[in-house]
Structure formats: C-alpha cells, structure tokens
Amino acid sequence: MTDTPKKTLVRRAPWPASVSRPVVTPLQMSVVYASECPDQLDAQYAGRVPGYTYAREGHPNADMLSRMIDGLEGVEGGLIVGSGMAAVTAALMGLLSAGDHVIGADQLYGRSLRLMTQDLARFGIETSTADPTDAKAIAAAIRPNTKVIIIEIVSNPTLRLADMEGIAKLTRAKGITLVVDNTFTTPRGFQPIAHGADVVLHSVTKMLAGHADVTLGYVAARDPAQRKAIYDFAVTTGLTPSPFDCWLAERGMYSFTLRYDRAEQNAARLADHLASLTGVKRVLYPTRADHPDHNRAQHLLQGRGGHMVSFELTGGRDAANALTRAMPDVAFAPTLGDIGTTLSHPASSSHRNVSHAARAAVGISEGFFRISVGCEEIEILLEDFTRGVKAAAEVS
Ligand SMILES: *Cc1c(COP(=O)(O)O)cnc(C)c1O
C-alpha cells in the first residue's frame, strides 16, 4: 500500500484558528501535553519555560483555581488536590517523618483527627491532641520531636476560637510548623499566613466552590522547601484534582465574596432570632456577646462572625426529629458552604462515634444543631427556623 490515507480519525486535528479568545476559562481535559522536542521538555522540567507535561503533575484548570485562592490567602504557589482531606494528608505526610510528633487541635474535623490518631501512628508518627483555645495547653503538649501543630481557627461544631496569636508565638519561638485548616473561616474571614501560620489549607468543597457539586482541596506553604515537599508527596501519591472539578470550583469562586458576605449577614440575623425563640437553650455565634470567646473573636475576625451558627434545643432527640421534619426545605445534610442553608446534627453524624461523656464535655447534646447559613432571603430563613423550633418545643 503506497497510498496511505491522509485522513484518520485517530489523530486529533489542530484547534481551529481564531483571532478572538474565549472569555470563559476553557476546560482542559487533556492528560498529556505534547512538547516540540527533548530540549524543550528538558527546559520545561527545569522550569526555564512554562509548560505542562502530565495532568497528575499539574494542569491549567488547577492552576487557574489555585491562583485565585493564593490571592485571597496572600500566599504563592498553592496546590489544588482532590479533596480537603487530600490537602490535610499532603500537608501532614509531606512534612512529617517517622519519629516526628504532631499536635492537633482536639476539635479538628473528624477525619483529620482520625488520620492523625489512626493512620499516622501506623507510619511511626506520634500524635497528641490539645485544646487550641488555650496556648498553654498546646505548649504543655510540645515534645522535643514536635514538628507540626495543626489547628482550625473556628472549631466544629461549637465555634470556639483558637488562641491563634499565642500558638503562632509558640511555633515561631520553637521552629515548629503551624498548619491552619481555614475552611470554616475562609480567607474573607481570616488570613492565617498574615497571622503567623506556615501552611494554610482548605476544603474547597465547602464555601469556596460553594455549590456542593465538587470535592476539592487546597494547600499552600510559605516556605519554598515545604511547598516542594507537599507538592512531591501529592503528585507521587496521586492526590490529583479533576480539571472539570477545578473548572466548576473556579466558576463558583467568582461569586465567593458576594455569597460569603450575604451568608454572614444572614447568619448574624438568624443567630439573634434563634436566641429569641422559646425552646432554644443557647446559640453560638462569634459576634454575639454571650459567645464564650467573644473578645478573641472580635479581635481575630475583626468584628465579623462568618456563616456558621450553632444552637441547642431545650429538648432532646425527639425535639431534634421534630425540627428537621418541620422544615424540609432546609437540607438536613452533614455538609457546609452550599449556596442554600444546610443543617447538621453532630450527635447523629460527625460525632456519632464520640462517647456521650466526651460529647457532653464540649456541649454537644441530642438537641444540638449546626447551621451552614446560605444566601436565601432572610425572611424565608427566619420563617423556616421559627416553624422548626416551634415544632421542637411542642414535643419537648
Ligand atoms: C469538610 C472539611 C474537611 C474535609 O474536606 P473534604 O473536601 O470533604 O475532603 C477538612 N476540614 C474541614 C474543616 C472541613 O469542614
């Protein structure tokens, strides 16, 4: 056969020429990137020229998203990974080795605590937990081999404020790496790097992407050597995000500021409203004068309260069932950061495997709820919760 076909379906045609450019970020699903020649590939790997090679090592949709979050956090070179837990894993396993010790805040996200106490232990990494609202408790947990301390600024679900200043002073004095999971506060509420953190991470799944339709994480380190250690661990272990998920999250990010401010405004109104209702035992919201860490909250969050509100009914499980049944339009779902309000019940979800005594110690009863306040019109939200609390009070 001398006459080889000129047309084949197995070789992709070049992209159509155009003098105009798309306004919306293109979705780049390509796993591999072709280079001109080995010299060019060398130059790419050496970082002398920009270019992508293989999607597990990085792709443009992830970079578009990470640059947006970098800008909000005031840091460079952040990495997008497949979930918030991938970000926690990359930070801890990228920075710790066998024989090291890590301290975690005792109210960290449940899976983060599990990773530390169950999984890191299998790799010879020691873990302790301590109360982050008290820098003295953290100091008391420090050992000669302590390498990393990981905290959240606002805890889940009791919304306690970490002693960020006290802890940052400790880590700086002792050369310990301070990692902050900033998911709850978001960079609009608090910027950990400016307050002495070395590493900041997010579950982008929540408020940043904001529509409960992608699972993604973000992690950034201030120090280039730590950044590289985290990047290499994530790429080697394949914590890669999907380009489509990054594209969706980028789209969500354009309205992040608007959504956050609206949700926060709603949260402050809803917190005060709940506190006025019969059948509500207590309300936790950082800007309220009755919040246990009110002064620290005012100082760290600069008068802002965020989009999370927790409250406790006077009744128990029956009251809790009555409340969720009476307000079916508010999704009873264990997540946060969606555009609409969601409601979670820690005793039956995040804290179901925590003993009654340990739950009682942090004030999580059967009547305890956490609200991720959304962007609804406030009147609708107030009506929903008025109806829910009334139904709960009737069975208590
Ligand atoms: C949800 C969450 C995570 C885990 O994120 P995923 O995207 O679900 O893996 C970690 N930390 C905090 C504070 C979270 O709320």
Image (tube, rainbow, N blue to C red):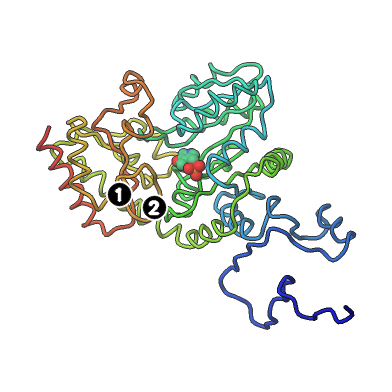
Which x, y percent locates residue 114?
Answer: 50, 28
- Asked if residue 83 is positioned above or below residue 143 in the image, the reply reads below
State the residue at coordinates (38%, 26%). 353
Secondary structure category for the residue under label 1: strand
Which x, y percent locates residue 344?
Answer: 32, 40
Residue 331 circle label: 1
**Quarter the C terminus occupies:** top left
Which x, y percent locates residue 15?
Answer: 69, 76
Distance from disc 2 to disc 1, alpha carbons, whole Å, reads 10 Å
Of circles 2 and 1, which is in front? 1
Residue 361 circle label: none
Choose top left, top right, bottom left or bottom right for residue 343: top left
Instruction: Residue type at mark 2: give it.
Output: Asp
Pointers 2 and 1 in contact (CB under 8 A)?
Answer: yes
Ligand 1 contact, mark 2 (Cβ < 8 Å): no
Secondary structure category for the residue under label 2: loop
Residue furthest out toward the front:
1
State the residue at coordinates (40%, 35%). 156
- Residue identifier under label 2: 338
